[in-house]
């Protein structure tokens, strides 16, 4: 149903890709009911696209895959992967205690001071147990136990609370395993058990200046690239990559070089928008695993060597000159056609011709310089006079020469 990846799709398969290119999700039944569907076997097209991994199925609905996005990007169509559908639990407002993620976490946190309260109460009671008269030293010992207990509780609260800013998130590790994220605001953790790590989720930008890249036709070009991104999920940014900033820089540079290597110099310069979309799609495919969301990418420059640039300028100049010559030729042809049309009209209407003639004489007489104008009628008069004189001379010379002036008289005997 679908040809080779380098060839064009059949209309029905290409239509399916275009319908899914905006991040939409459709079932097969919904696709079959959409208007303007081209003729063809929809089921065979879906199966072929699934086999080539251009689309994928999630929960009974078809969405576009990374290979399909790259295929459309190579043909100048910008596509995007669909966003994850929110789960039902995202819409249910949960009741939870302040500063804690759940009641279970709150009960575990409050259990620590309560457990310490038991030995504190036991030591305080043992200091005065069995005595009817409590001496000063016994009272001091009892008070010391409670002071120590409250000091431990205050230290426990101080170690467990954290202020998380709006631009930060707190990832909690317990026993070496990431158990979740918290923030922003005031949060409490289990001290000496939980290991918190702060992650900055503000947008970050990076500019790659004059990165040397080799095109498909083996031309060395300098590429300038800009990318901005932010951490959307802080947990994989800590667990799946060591230094997210450095890794994003290396990933952007590697994808930039690899993608430009698939284009010729001419195609890369003519289809920069499609090239930029393809680069972004490939960066997003890997960056999503790190919890990074791409905000913007821009291929700012693609400068070929001086020799290639001069060749391109010469071709551009030649194209401009060719177009200018065609425009001039078309203008001359239109002018000649208009002139012939006007001439034919004046030939059919002598009055219009005379009016145009008088208007031309008036324009010629404009200005301060002295002009001698000989009307066209004077030449017509000379032409008629010459013709008349020529006719008169012909009549006067009639009879001269070898031709007799008239018929000869009848012959007779000579006397």
Image (tube, grey):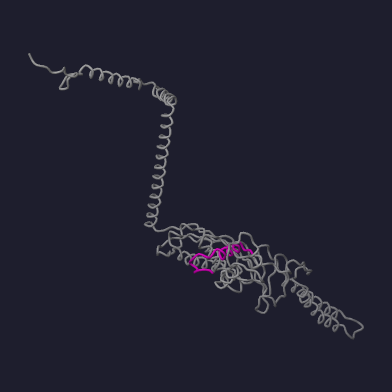
Against 114, is 166 above or below? above
| Apparent side of residue 23 relative to residue 74 in the rendered image (left or right) | right
Residue 316, position as x, y percentages in the image = 40, 51
Q: Is residue 371 visible?
A: no
Please say whether residue 10 is one of the residues in the magenta stretch.
yes
Against 162, is 36 above or below? above
Residue 397, position as x, y percentages in the image = 20, 18
Residue 345 lies in what quarter of the image? top left
Determine the residue positioned at 30% across, 21% down. 383
Task: State the residue lying farthest toward the right.
Answer: 132
Q: Is residue 14 visible?
A: yes
Magenta segment: 1-24
Please say whether residue 401 is one of the residues in the magenta stretch.
no
Residue 164 lies in what quarter of the image? bottom right
Number of residue marks: 0
Residue 222, position as x, y percentages in the image = 44, 60
Q: Nearer the viewer, residue 412 or 335?
A: 412
Q: Nearer the viewer, residue 298 or 379?
A: 379
Against 401, is 187 above or below? below
Task: State the residue lying farthest toward the left.
Answer: 415
Residue 236, position as x, y percentages in the image = 62, 72
Q: Nearer the viewer, residue 326 or 133?
A: 326
């Amino acid at each position: 149903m679908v040809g080779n990846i380098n060839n064009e799709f059949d209309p029905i398969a290409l239509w399916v890709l275009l319908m899914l290119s905006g991040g939409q999700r459709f079932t097969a039944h919904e696709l079959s009911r959409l208007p303007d569907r081209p003729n063809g076997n929809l089921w065979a097209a879906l199966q072929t696209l699934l086999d080539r991994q251009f689309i994928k199925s999630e929960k009974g609905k078809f969405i576009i895959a990374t290979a399909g996005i790259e295929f459309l990007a190579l043909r100048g169509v910008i596509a995007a992967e669909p966003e994850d559908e929110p789960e039902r639990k995202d819409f249910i407002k949960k009741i939870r205690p302040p500063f804690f993620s759940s009641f279970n976490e709150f009960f575990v946190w409050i259990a620590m001071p309560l457990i310490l309260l038991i030995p504190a109460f036991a030591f305080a009671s043992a200091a005065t147990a069995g005595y009817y008269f409590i001496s000063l030293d016994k009272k001091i010992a009892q008070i010391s136990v409670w002071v120590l207990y409250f000091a431990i509780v205050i230290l426990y609260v101080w170690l467990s609370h954290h202020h998380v800013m709006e631009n930060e998130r707190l990832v909690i590790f317990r026993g070496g395993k990431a158990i979740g994220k918290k923030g922003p605001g005031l949060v409490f953790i289990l001290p000496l058990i939980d290991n918190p790590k702060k992650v900055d989720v503000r947008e970050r930008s990076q500019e790659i200046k004059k990165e040397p890249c080799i095109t498909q036709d083996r031309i060395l070009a300098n590429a300038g690239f800009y990318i901005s991104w932010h951490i959307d999920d802080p947990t994989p940014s800590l667990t799946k990559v060591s230094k997210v900033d450095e890794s994003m820089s290396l990933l952007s540079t590697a994808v930039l070089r690899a993608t430009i290597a698939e284009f010729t110099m001419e195609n890369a310069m003519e289809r920069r928008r499609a090239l930029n979309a393809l680069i972004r799609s490939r960066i997003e495919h890997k960056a999503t695993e790190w919890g990074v969301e791409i905000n913007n990418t821009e291929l700012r420059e693609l400068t070929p060597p001086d020799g290639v640039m001069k060749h391109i300028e010469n071709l551009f100049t030649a194209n401009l000159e060719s177009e200018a010559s065609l425009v001039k030729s078309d203008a001359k042809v239109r002018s000649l056609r208009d002139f012939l049309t006007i001439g034919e009209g004046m030939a059919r209407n002598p009055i219009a011709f005379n009016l145009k003639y008088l208007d031309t004489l008036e324009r010629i007489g404009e200005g301060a310089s002295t002009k001698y104008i000989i009307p066209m009628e004077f030449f017509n008069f000379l032409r008629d006079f010459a013709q008349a004189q020529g006719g008169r001379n012909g009549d006067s010379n009639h009879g001269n020469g070898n031709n007799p002036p008239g018929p000869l008289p009848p012959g007779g005997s000579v006397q």
